Amino acid sequence: MRYVKGAVPFAVTLAVVAATTAVLLYFKLAGAGPHHPIFLYLLPIALIGFLFGSMPATLFAITAIFCSAFFLYDPVYSFRVSNPREFGDLICFMILALMTVKCTVELLRPVKVPAPVSPRLGRF
């Protein structure tokens, strides 16, 4: 049971990556896709970071880079990216996605409340 409980975040992460990639691929093949489709992965990365923590969100970011290079950038169905600007998109996305993961983890960190200061020698 422990292994199943630990595998659920990673399974959900891979399912969300697959669903996001399928939607973006559909719009690309229909001709109505965005010019920089990889940046649409940022919202699901933040959602996975809020729900499951930094490890599944980092896995999502890395998987999103490979999925977008394979499915969304020309030549399709190849990891080769023909346009240097699109390769720059992948690098910028990698940096931005890791910053997104770090920010979501920091937002979820509990706030430490400082201990109340006791009055010195019974005076206020």
Image (cartoon, rainbow, N blue to C red):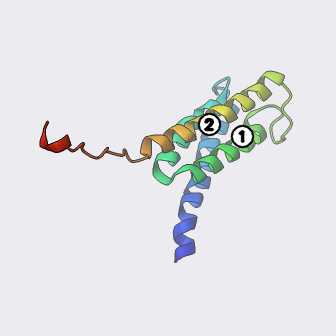
Position in image of residue 27 (x %, y %) = 63, 33
- The residue depicted at 67 percent of the width and 33 percent of the height is 95
Read off the residue under disc 2: 97
What is the secondary structure assignment of the residue under circle 2? helix
Three-letter amino acid code at disc 2? Ala
Is residue 28 found left or right of 16 in the rendered image?
Answer: right
User: What percent of the width, then of the height, locates residue 5?
Assistant: 51, 69
Q: Is residue 36 above or below residue 2?
A: above
User: In the drawing, does residue 49 fall left or right of residue 30?
Assistant: left
75 above or below 10? above
| Residue type marked 1 | Ile
Which residue is identified by label 1?
65
* 2 and 1 marks in contact (CB < 8 Å): yes
* Quadrant in which the C terminus is drawn: top left
* 77 vs 82: above or below: below
Which of the two marks, 2 or 1, is nearer to us in this view? 2
